[in-house]
Amino acid sequence: MKTLRNIIAPFLFVFLVASPVLAVVTPFPSRVAAIECEQTFLGITPWYRGLTEVVNTNGTEQCVISAPADTSDGLQIFITKIALNIIGIVLALTAYVAFFFITFGGFQFLTGGSNAAQIEKARKTILNAVIGLVISIGAVAVVNLVFGILG
């Protein structure tokens, strides 16, 4: 039984620890001539996502926000994309707040000792934060789906 554990343990380490680390640090091939217009910061997309285009001026590429189309649908889609981006930003910030409250509830739970009231308060904090996180992630998925439909 002990030899079986000695054989399985390295494989579990590779699949649970080493593989995710290698997946994160694997370099991606760089695009030489393209520039990124819509960079994210900690998973928070900019408010102008989906509204930029690369313009070549005087031999240099610049990102500019494209004007809405001349039709009424073009302006409506332009405003809808901005609204969806702002909603996405708020939802991403909500996910960070939920993560903070999960951590805070865990801290309360660890420092509660034998105080049943504090442990129950910590449990409720963690439960409410997890529910908020799940709702937030679902809402982000819906916003991205609508954004994808709009193009």
Image (cartoon, grey):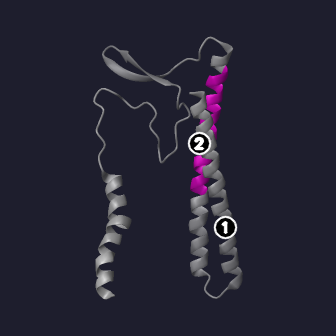
149 horizontally vs 62: left or right: right
Residue in the image at 59% along x and 68% along y: 104
User: Quadrant of residue 132 in the image?
Assistant: bottom right
User: Quadrant of residue 36 in the image?
Assistant: top left
Looking at the rendering, in which quadrant would you find the C terminus? top right
Question: Badge 2: how crowded within 10 Å, few (<14), some, or many (20+)?
Answer: some
- How many angstroms separate mark 1 from mark 2 (CA)? 23 Å
Marks 1 and 2 in Cβ contact (< 8 Å): no
Question: Which residue, given by chain and number where applicable, does mark 1 sit on?
Answer: 127
> Secondary structure under badge 1?
helix
Residue in the image at 58% along x and 48% along y: 92
**Residue occupying the far right of the picture:** 117
Counting residues from the start of the chain, the first of labels 1 and 2 encountered is: 2
Amino acid carrying mark 1 in the image: Leu
Residue range (magenta): 76-97
Per the picture, the main secondary structure of the magenta-coloured stretch is: helix
Please state which of residues 21 and 129 is positioned toward the viewer in this rendering: 21
Do we see residue 90 in this rendering?
A: no
**Numbered badge on residue 89:** 2
Say above or below: 59 vs 103: above
Residue 145 pos. (x, y %): 60, 38
Say above or below: 110 vs 49: below
Question: Badge 1: how crowded within 10 Å, few (<14), some, or many (20+)?
Answer: some
> Secondary structure under badge 2?
helix
Residue in the image at 68% along x and 15% along y: 72
Say above or below: 127 vs 148: below
Looking at the rendering, in which quadrant would you find the N terminus? bottom left
Do we see residue 44 in this rendering?
A: yes
Amino acid carrying mark 2 in the image: Ile
97 horizontally vs 21: left or right: right
52 horizontally vs 2: left or right: right
Q: Which label sits in the foreground, 1 or 2? A: 1
